[in-house]
Each structure stands twice: as C-alpha cells, then as structure tokens.
Image (cartoon, grey):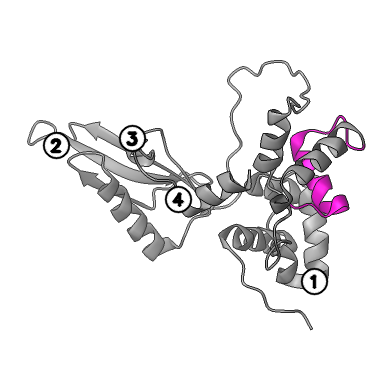
C-alpha cells in the first residue's frame, strides 16, 4: 500500500509534469525543460515515481534534520567528494550524485555556495556564441504566462493615456485576460492574476520584466524561506 504524503508546490509541479509524461502528452526532454532538471534526472525520478507513487516526490529530508546542520564537517565532505570521486562534474550533476549515491540532499544553489566559498568553480564547456537564438516555447497551454504592461494613447486623444496590463500564453500566444489601468501597478497585476486563476486555473510559471513592482526593495525584510536558506549556509 502506497503511503500518503503532502507535497509542497515544487513537488506538486513535478507530479503534474510526470503525469503528463505518463499520459504521453509530453516527452522527457520537454519535462526536463519545464522542471529545470537534466533529462537523466527526470528519467530517474520518473522510474521511482512509477514504483512508489507520489510519495517518491517528497523531499528526502522531510521529518529529519537536514544534512547541513553538520556544518563544517558536511562542507569538508562535499569538497572532498567534489575534488576526488566526482572531480570534473558540473554543479548540477554533482548535486544529483550527492543525493543519489551519498544520501546528501541539498539544493544546487547550496552546493554551489559551498564550492564557491572554497574557490571551486563548476567546469563549463566553451561553446560558440549563438546569434539571436530563440527559446523554444513551452509545449502546452497554461504552463507559462508572459505578463507585461503597455502605456499608450489607447483612446486616440479622447482621454488620458492608459496602461494595458495583460498576459500572453507562451505555448499558444493567446491572451487569457487583460485590463486597462492608469499606471502599471501591483494592484493591476493582482486583478489580472485573480481573473486568470478563476477562469483558467493556476499557471505553472510567470515571466515578467524587471519593473520595480516585481522587485523587493532593499528595506524589506527577508522571507522565512530566505532566512532559513541563509542560516543553513
């Protein structure tokens, strides 16, 4: 009997994508791009998911003390493994090998910080520069929405300038919703997202520009997740 587990948002996203692969609606390469994982790692978690169900997607450290409470001993162990057993691996592959073979489950960013502080950088292959290469669109509708605001004389001189705040689906180019605002502001995006979620469901990801309303000001306190991540490092 498969045990019941509660998945966080990241794990729920993996579950949705893996189910799409199982139904034949998505191939492994597309799943790897959506989840920001290597194809090898997607195949690995898919194999475990087929055997153990959703419980296989739950974080391995849940309910246990994380490995990084070991402090300096853990850092030394990771550095030693990186420079000996797994010499030549990039940070992504090394992080996966730590979890798979050594039982050390850390995020790639945590492993990267430990290595960088010791002066160990991820090896990179030199590739010829790409000229105006285009990113492939997401494979299915609803996975990624691109949001933006456009200030323009939409009323053609019959009133003040307005800003059109809208979202475009990355896979289809459709616009699920848009609205006019006096300025591009946070409330406008909240209204936009509320209507989209109500009518179409929650998208997997959002893309936006670097407008100030999407950036936390320097005076704002860190979130609990950011504080915990900094303490672990």
Q: Residues within 10 Å of mark 1 (few under 14, many from 20)?
A: some
Q: Where, quadrant-wise, is the N terminus in this rendering?
A: bottom right
x, y percent for residue 119: 73, 24
User: Which residue occupies the foreground of this view, 98 or 151?
Assistant: 98
Of badges 4 and 2, the one in the foreground is 4
Of badges 1 and 4, the one in the foreground is 4
Q: How far apart in space, not on screen, are marks 1 and 3 (Cα)?
A: 44 Å
Q: How far apart in space, not on screen, are marks 1 and 2 (Cα)?
A: 58 Å
Residue 159 counted in the magenta span: no
Q: How far apart in space, not on screen, are marks 4 and 2 (Cα)?
A: 41 Å
Name the residue at 76% across, 41% down.
Answer: 75
Q: Quadrant of residue 154?
A: top left
The numbered dot on residue 155 is 2
User: What secondary structure is found at the residue carrying circle 4?
Assistant: loop
Residue 99 counted in the magenta span: yes
Q: Give the residue number, with chain letter if any, for mark 4.
A: 223
């Amino acid at each position: 009997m498969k045990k019941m587990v509660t998945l966080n948002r990241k794990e729920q996203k993996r579950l949705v994508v893996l189910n799409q692969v199982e139904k034949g609606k998505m191939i492994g390469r597309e799943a790897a791009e959506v989840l920001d994982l290597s194809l090898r790692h997607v195949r690995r978690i898919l194999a475990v998911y087929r055997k153990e169900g959703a419980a296989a997607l739950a974080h391995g450290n849940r309910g246990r003390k994380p490995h990084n409470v070991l402090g300096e001993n853990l850092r030394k162990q990771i550095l030693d493994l990186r420079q000996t057993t797994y010499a030549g691996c990039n940070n992504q592959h090394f992080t996966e090998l730590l979890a798979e073979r050594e039982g050390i489950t850390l995020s790639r960013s945590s492993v990267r910080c430990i290595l960088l502080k010791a002066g160990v950088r991820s090896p990179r292959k030199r590739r010829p520069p790409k000229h105006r290469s285009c990113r492939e669109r997401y494979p299915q509708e609803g996975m990624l929405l691109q949001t933006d605001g456009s200030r323009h004389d939409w009323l053609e001189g019959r009133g003040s300038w307005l800003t059109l705040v809208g979202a475009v689906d990355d896979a289809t180019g459709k616009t699920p919703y848009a609205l006019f605002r006096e300025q591009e502001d946070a409330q406008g995006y909240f209204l936009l997202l509320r209507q989209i979620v109500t009518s179409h469901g929650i998208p997997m990801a959002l893309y936006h520009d670097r407008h100030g309303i999407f950036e936390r000001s320097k005076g704002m306190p860190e979130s609990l997740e950011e504080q915990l991540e900094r303490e672990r490092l």
